[in-house]
Amino acid sequence: MTNLSEIVPVQPDGGAIWTDCIRIYTDAFPPWEREWDQVLEKRIASDRYQMRAGLKDGQVVGFYILDVEEEGQKYALFSYLAVDERLRGRGYGEELTRHAIRLFSEFGRRDWFLIEAEDRQARFYGRIGFLKLGIDYFVPRYDGSGAEPMSLMAIPLRGPAKSIDGGEMKQIVERIYRSGYKLQADDPRLERQLSLIPAEVLLIAWPPEAQPGK
């Protein structure tokens, strides 16, 4: 059963849907986790970011942003998902996430659908089908004041997988940090994160009780 009436593309044109999405975005994420307005708008306008709004009887209930990066990249990053705080707990977040997974599959030639998630969010995404990467992972703060511990999670596009090659993972993480977060190559946050990636990165069913034998 579909809860949302429709899920529509969004552009930063000043319309009511855009305004409602930005209100939800500002309410849902702390300042350190929000991109600069001009960067967000530029990436959406250029179609690097695919922004979709979920509507219920004409009302915006939530949105997501999918970072499809440049052509030739092996991943897409599920950058943001938020539901109006007054309308949470009704399944809208799951419906938007599943829509994003379907949209991701349309871009082809990409191996991994990734998301950075806090503990509570990681459990939500794990139940939908994301696997947790077996590394300590830190998300750079947009305000330049360090990094926050999160889980990096993935859905493999090309069928079941138990691990990701560490060299490939380092390339992906470096791209996320430098292209997404605009860190320089010698930023200590990037150097630290790359040092935490082993030769083989396991993919772990999440939450823990989802693992066999738990």
Image (spheres, grey):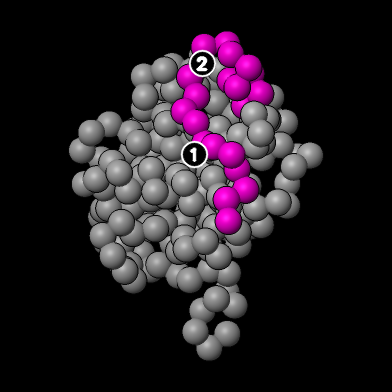
Q: Which mark is residue 12?
A: 2
Residue farthest toward the top in the current orientation of the protein: 14
Residue 182 locus on image (x, y percent): 42, 27
Q: The disc labelled 1 sits on which kind of residue?
A: Ser
Q: Nearer the viewer, residue 106 or 177?
A: 106
C-alpha gap between disc 1 and disc 2:
17 Å
Q: Nearer the viewer, residue 143 or 4?
A: 4
Q: Is residue 163 above or below residue 194?
A: below
Q: Is residue 164 above or below residue 58?
A: below
Q: Residue at x 49, y 31 (%)?
A: 8
Residue 84 appears anywhere in the view: yes
Q: Give the image quarter of residue 197.
A: bottom left
Q: Is residue 156 above or below residue 77?
A: below
Q: The disc labelled 2 sits on which kind of residue?
A: Pro
Q: Residue at x 44, y 37 (%)?
A: 66
Q: Is residue 211 above or below residue 76?
A: below
The numbered mark, 1 or 2, whose residue comes first in the sequence reads 2
Residue 29 in the figure: left or right of residue 192: right
Residue 138 appears anywhere in the view: no
